[in-house]
Image (spheres, rainbow, N blue to C red):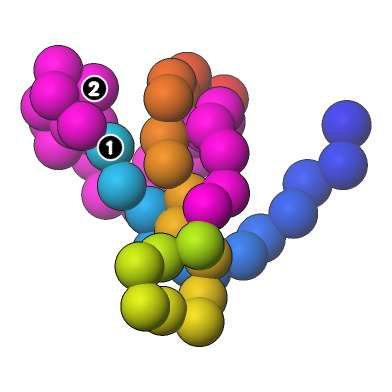
Amino acid sequence: MRQVKVALKAVALGALAERLQRQALGSPWRFDGFLASARGGRQPVFHIQDFQPL
């Protein structure tokens, strides 16, 4: 498996956002989701649909 590090804006909604908020900052995770362009923005936003600890 290839590991990639990247910094970009991300969004999670509802119960998923609440689960994500309870996780330790800096701990390793695998995120699943999709990239979409932000409204009126130049950078893409990662929409988190699920995550799991590594």
Residue visible at 20% across and 32% down in the picture: 13
Does dot 2 land on a helix, a strand or a loop? helix
Residue visible at 42% across and 35% down in the picture: 48
Q: Nearer the viewer, residue 39 or 19?
A: 39
| Left-right relation of 33 to 12 | right
> Is residue 45 located in the magenta-colored stretch of the structure?
no
- Residue 19 visible in the snapshot: no
Hey, which quadrant is residue 34 in on the image?
top right
Q: Nearer the viewer, residue 45 or 8?
A: 45
Q: CA distance from mark 2 to mark 1?
A: 6 Å
Query: Tag 1: residue type?
Result: Ala
Residue visible at 66% across and 60% down in the picture: 5
Query: Tag 2: residue type?
Result: Leu
Which residue is identified by label 2?
A: 16
Which residue is identified by label 1?
A: 12
| The N terminus - image quarter | top right
| Left-right relation of 9 to 33 | left
- Residue 48 visible in the snapshot: yes
Tag shown at residue 30: none
| Left-right relation of 52 to 19 | right
| The C terminus - image quarter | top right
**Among all residues in the image, which is located at the extreme front?**
40
Residue 35: x %, y % from top left:
57, 49
Kindly check if marks 2 and 1 are in contact, taking CB atoms under 8 A apart as contact.
Answer: yes
Magenta span covers which residues? 13-36
Hey, which quadrant is residue 21 in on the image?
top left
Residue 4: x %, y % from top left:
74, 54
